Image (cartoon, rainbow, N blue to C red):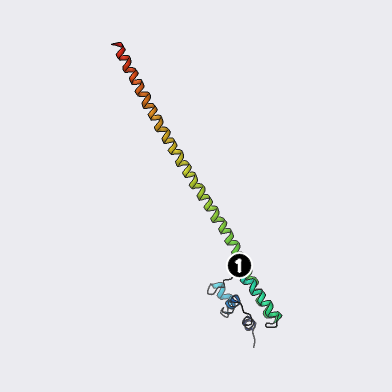
């Protein structure tokens, strides 16, 4: 007796595609294996498009029947949706990483700017101290000169 699963597996055998081979290699209870993480299918959008084309070609050539065609197409479209969602998630993550990198670079620049400002302040303080020391020496010399004039 031919079950839907067996018919699907027979249809998979008629299609030459690495992605379809991954699907064919799944255990008989593929849905449970995929949801439990016991099995997985890794596919790019390009591989999925290629597999869809090969399924269409196999159907057009009579290598698979309509039920196999519908089952395979539905499974591949589901994979495509998951792949697109993963790509969107990857893009969002990339955006967050770039945003974080930008924030880190801005914070680094702020630290460098503050460090430069502190160095400038310290330099200004040294100049003020030298000016004060010179003013003090001048005042001291003036005081000494006045003392000498009194004598």
Q: Identify which residue is drawn at 64% across, 73% down.
A: 50
* Quarter of image, res 3: bottom right
Q: Label 1: state its secondary structure.
A: helix
Counting labels gives 1
Q: Identify which residue is drawn at 45% across, 40% down.
A: 116
| Residue 61: % across, % down | 70, 82
Q: Which residue is most to the top? A: 151
Q: Which residue is most to the bottom? A: 1
- Residue beneath disc 1: 83
Q: Identify which residue is drawn at 34% across, 23% down.
A: 137
Q: Is residue 136 above or below residue 63?
A: above
| Residue 34: % across, % down | 56, 73
Q: Nearer the viewer, residue 65 or 102?
A: 102
| Residue 93: % across, % down | 56, 59
Q: Is residue 75 visible?
A: no
Q: Is residue 128 visible?
A: yes
Q: Which residue is most to the left? A: 151
Picture quarter with the N terminus: bottom right
Q: Is residue 13 above or below residue 36?
A: below
Q: Identify which residue is drawn at 58% across, 61% down.
A: 89
| Residue 14: % across, % down | 64, 82
Picture quarter with the C terminus: top left
Q: Nearer the viewer, residue 143 or 20?
A: 143
User: Badge 1 local density, few (<14 within 10 Å), some, or many (20+)?
Assistant: some
* Quarter of image, res 132: top left
Quick check: 144 left or right of 50? left
């Amino acid at each position: 007796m031919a079950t839907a699963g067996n018919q699907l597996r027979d249809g998979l055998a008629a299609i030459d595609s690495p992605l379809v081979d991954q699907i064919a290699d799944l255990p008989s209870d593929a849905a449970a294996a995929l949801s439990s993480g016991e099995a997985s299918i890794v596919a790019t959008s390009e591989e999925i498009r290629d597999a869809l084309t090969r399924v269409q070609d196999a159907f057009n050539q009579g290598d698979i029947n309509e039920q196999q065609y519908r089952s395979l197409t539905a499974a591949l479209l589901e994979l495509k949706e998951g792949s697109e969602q993963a790509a969107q998630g990857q893009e969002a993550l990339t955006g967050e990483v770039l945003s974080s990198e930008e924030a880190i670079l801005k914070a680094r620049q702020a630290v460098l700017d503050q460090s430069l400002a502190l160095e400038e302040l310290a330099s200004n303080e040294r100049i003020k101290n030298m000016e004060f020391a010179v003013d003090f020496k001048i005042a001291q010399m003036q005081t000494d000169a006045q003392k000498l004039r009194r004598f």
